[in-house]
Image (spheres, rainbow, N blue to C red):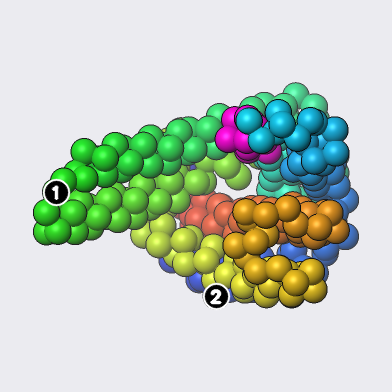
Amino acid sequence: MEPGATHIKVPVGAVVVAAWRAVFGRLGMVLELGWLALLLMLAALLLPVLALRYLAPADIVAANGPGLAAGEAILDAAVALLALNAFAVRWHRLMLTGSGRTMPRRLFAGAWLRFILYSLAFYAAGIGFAAAVWYSGIADLDATGTLAASANAAAAAAAAALLLAMARASLLFPAAALGVPLALGTAWRAMRGNTWRLLLASVAAALPIVLATGVLLGQLLAVVHLDAADALSGDPPLGFVLLSGVLEVVLRLILMALGASILSDFYRRILWQRKESTS
């Protein structure tokens, strides 16, 4: 493949429509490939909360609240990282080969490990950036309004650049799922001219789902007579905790399927069409 041989402009609308059809036209397949990931995430999200509420002594929970909350968040993030990446490997395979059920164990293990490493690299970049912004904010507490505004603008520009860089390198994922991993430089060059299209397609596909979930969550809060602040700071009813937990993990799975569908379509349109045009 010659990355600069043919420049292909991926159609954003067609990709979004195809992703929606792929996910919502076969929700049964989402559950078939992702049921284990869904159960694991649900357990990691809800079991610590339920254990602290019903099993742990109240004085210990009150005395160690911040530490326990941090532990819950770390456990949830770790399980989500492993479970969602396993599901993403299989969904990428489904989108690119037509079958995600059967996959050689060595190929799956290698792809899963690459997905985890790529995700950790992206997360580390994001956490490093957030830490740098936080540290600079602490250092500039006594800065004038002009300096503070300039720092905020610089932070926003840097965040946008980081997001673009992650999107530009994202073809690493579908390539790994196929067992034909790309070098970072190759993936970077292949996405030239389509990075913003990938971001736009991702936002356009996910935004209606996020908004609908927000509306549904608001309805749940209304049913139990809570507002958002009470749900976060108080002790909401058990039914609300369970329903919101299920809603959250299902949302994660659907958004991952949508993202993987979009990314697989970009991979197919850019690399496979380019290969065909140069052969």
Looking at the picture, how far across and down is residue 189, in whole percent? 37, 46
Label 2 sits on what residue type?
Gly
For label 1, the residue is 143
Left or right: residue 171 versus residue 36 is left
Looking at the picture, how far across and down is residue 63, in whole percent? 63, 30
Residue 111 in view here: no
Q: Is residue 183 above or below residue 90?
A: above
Q: Disc number at residue 42? A: none
Left or right: residue 26 versus residue 210 is right
72 inside magenta stretch: yes
Looking at the picture, how far across and down is residue 44, in whole percent? 76, 38
Nearer the viewer's eye, disc 2 or disc 1? 1
Total tally of numbered discs in the picture: 2
Looking at the picture, how far across and down is residue 5, in whole percent? 38, 52
Circle 1 packing at 10 Å, graded few (<14), some (14-19), many (20+), is: few
Label 1 sits on what residue type?
Ala
Point out the stretch of residues depicted in magenta: 64-78
103 inside magenta stretch: no
Q: Residue at x 62, y 72 (%)?
A: 211
Q: How many angstroms separate mark 2 from mark 1 (CA)?
A: 45 Å
Left or right: residue 219 versus residue 197 is right
Q: Residue at x 14, y 48 (%)?
A: 143
Q: Secondary structure at mark 1?
A: loop
Q: Residue furthest top?
A: 106
Q: Residue at x 54, y 63 (%)?
A: 202
For label 2, the residue is 13
- Asked whether the beta carbons under mark 2 and mark 1 sit within 8 Å of each other, the answer is no
